[in-house]
Image: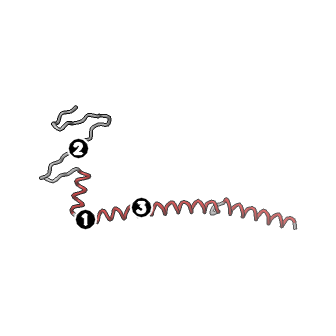
Amino acid sequence: MRVVTLILFVILVLLQFKLWLGEGGFREVARLETRVEDQRQLNDDLLQRNAELQAEVEDLRERLDAVEERARNELGLIKPDEQFYQVVPPPPGTSETVKNDGEST
């Protein structure tokens, strides 16, 4: 009877070992669930980005002013009858003031 009890105890310990630490055990399942959740979050982020890009593509297809705005902002293009003025701020730390007649002080 002692031998049977010992054999059953050893089998129980081996099954518990496999359940907790072996392949397909609780630790691996928890790790895989974490990876699935991370991938799901990444997929949601990519779906949102795709929707934004699709909306931008539709906007560029349907509206000429959207194309014009993008050409102006990203490429610096101007129309043939326009003049381009670029305002450059003074370097930081300069306290030079300009009078009405254009002289610097």
Q: Quadrant of residue 22?
A: bottom right
Mark 3 vs mark 2: which is more N-terminal? 3
Q: Amino acid at mark 2?
A: Val
Circle 3: is it few (<14), some (14-19), or many (20+) Cα within 10 Å? Answer: few
- Residue at the disc numbered 2: 87
- Residue at the disc numbered 3: 46
Q: The C terminus appears in which quarter of the rendering?
A: top left
Q: Quadrant of residue 32?
A: bottom right
- Residue at the disc numbered 1: 61
**Where 103 sits versus 20, above or below?**
above
Circle 1: element type:
helix
Q: Amino acid at mark 1?
A: Arg
Q: Amino acid at mark 3?
A: Leu
Circle 3: element type:
helix
Q: Comparing marks 3 and 2, which lies closer to the viewer?
A: 2
Contact (CB < 8 A) between labels 3 and 1? no
Image point 72% across, 63% down: which residue?
Answer: 16
Q: The N terminus appears in which quarter of the rendering?
A: bottom right
Front one among 32 and 6: 32
